[in-house]
Image (tube, helix red, strand yellow):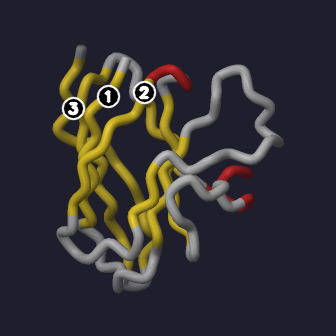
Amino acid sequence: MDIALHFINRSGDAGNSHVVIFQHMAAADLDEPLAALKVIRNPAMDESHDFVASTDAGDALWIGTARNVCDDDLVPPELAAGGATCLSLAGIAGVTIVMTGGCGEPLAFSLTDIVTR
């Protein structure tokens, strides 16, 4: 099943962080390289993006920031090894992912505007 996702940058980040969104396959070996599902390059304040994720890989999505990553690139090892935030999508048909923080505060990700199945 597909989930409609909306990302918005509400952080004070200066637009120099690439947001990397990825999923682990439920039965995959976590030591194997992962491909990025979506990379949002240098999102400016209030910039937003819409995209779709499939629950074929499970009901969780990981999101974090890195530099020099493009769509379909491998997820940087520091994110794949636990440097990303896990967001549960169980029972969700659509949601907004909000990035906050920046200006000396750690970047954080949360879910709002949740539409359930």
Packing grade of label 3 (10 A; few <14, some 14-19, many >=20) is some
Q: Image quadrant of residue 104?
A: bottom left
Residue visible at 21% across and 32% down in the picture? 114
Q: Nearer the viewer, residue 14 or 4?
A: 4
- Give the mark nearer the N terminus: 1 vs 3: 1
Q: Amino acid at mark 2?
A: Ser
Q: Amino acid at mark 1?
A: Ile
Q: Is residue 38 above or below residue 86?
A: below
Residues at marks 2 and 1, CA–CA distance in whole angstroms: 6 Å
- Give the mark nearer the N terminus: 2 vs 1: 1
Residue visible at 35% across and 85% down in the picture? 14
Mark 2 vs 1: CB contact within 8 A? yes
Q: Position of residue 87 (x, y in %)?
A: 45, 38
Q: Which residue is mark 1?
A: 3
Q: Position of residue 4 (x, y in %)?
A: 26, 34
Q: In this image, 32 relative to 67: left or right? A: right
Q: Secondary structure at mark 3?
A: strand
Residues at marks 3 and 2, CA–CA distance in whole angstroms: 16 Å
Q: Which residue is mark 2?
A: 54
